[in-house]
Image (cartoon, helix red, strand yellow):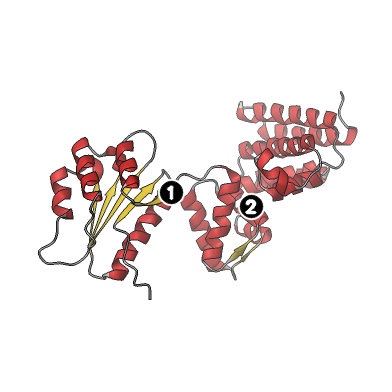
Amino acid sequence: MNTAPPDPLVLVQGDEELLAARAITSAVDAARAADPGADVREYEAGALAAGEVAEMLSPSLFGGSRVLVIRSGQDARKDLTTALLAYAKAPDPEVSLIVTHLGGAKGKALADGLRSAGATVVPVAKLRGEGELTRFIRDEFRRNGGRCDETAASALLAAVGNDLREIAAACSQLLADTDGKITPEVVARYYRGRAEVSGYNVADAVMIGDLPGALEALRWALHTGVDPVPIADAIADGVRTVAKVAAAGRGNPYQMATTLGMPAWKIKRAQERTRGWTPEGLVDAMQAAADCNAAVKGGAEDRGYALEQALFAVAEARRSGGSR
């Protein structure tokens, strides 16, 4: 059993709501593990007066641990900030003060002051880019006893989007419904028909020259009600990724990851797809993808036809090596 006392000062700093909520829960749980009867109270900084927080932080006549959660610390008025920072210089060991702060310039004095006072800082900034999000997915499965490789994590990200709460919910659902071994095939089975997955299936097929497979995937996706916009985006992304990796030349995907700003597995897959492409062909394919995006997002009368024409154009660009 962990009998370590909870942190007396905790600063949860960043703008990702799910991570902030988890950090608060973790800190409160630590306090309750030390004292199951701990008194927990939560306030919004913007609606809290200095006098109220002083009363909560003052020694209790009845003893016992207390947890004070102050949300949105960046909204604290000057008198509240002054009171909190004065308290932080000599915190009560029976109290856990947890303050959340979005970061940035607003209310910076409070965050900086708590940090200087020795608060435990929990960074909860929004995750940016595919690499950070796929790492979150893999960690989410790992800490709950599951396994998920980078390819499966990317497929899940494409299926559910970038909202961390939706991602976490999807991970939880997959863990509940499977043996915990998450593969691209498992993700495809559970999210078949989701726009992003179908779009990338179409793009993958056309980039390796499988025009019949790409057309079949496209027609199936449209038949099941997939919106054409994310399919057009996936085609454009597929062409751009191969062009970017081809321009970088051959190399170790792990060494190239930082330079290109994409995960190593994606670079490796794109390297495999560069076979059969010429620079001129990629230029023509990029133009076809751009024309397709303009038509699909510009309200073309038949967006399905525009997507089909794009696939024919990309396949022709690969086959002929381009017209330039």
Placement of the C terminus among the 4 image quadrants: top right
Q: Amino acid at mark 1?
A: Pro
- Residue position for label 1: 123
Residue type for callout 2:
Ala
Q: Secondary structure at mark 2?
A: helix
Counting residues from the start of the chain, the first of labels 2 and 1 encountered is: 1
| x 70%, y 28%: residue | 290
Q: Is residue 220 visible?
A: no
Q: Residue 181 vs residue 275: left or right?
A: left
User: Residue 22's image quarter?
Assistant: bottom left
Expressed as whole percent of the image width and height from the top left, the position of residue 244 reads 74, 35
Q: Secondary structure at mark 1?
A: strand
Query: Residue at point 33% right, 34% down?
Result: 106
Query: What is the x, y in percent for residue 111?
Result: 33, 42
- Label 2, label 1: how far apart the Cα atoms are: 27 Å
- Which residue does the image show at 76% across and 35% down from the upper left? 243
Residue 14, position in %: x, y? 41, 44
Q: Residues within 10 Å of mark 2 (few under 14, many from 20)?
A: many
Residue furthest out toward the left: 61
Extreme residue toward the top, this view? 324
Q: Residue furthest bottom?
A: 1
Q: Is residue 211 above or below residue 316?
A: below
Determine crowd level at label 1: few under 14, some 14-19, many 20+ residues with C-alpha closer than 10 A: some
For label 2, the residue is: 155
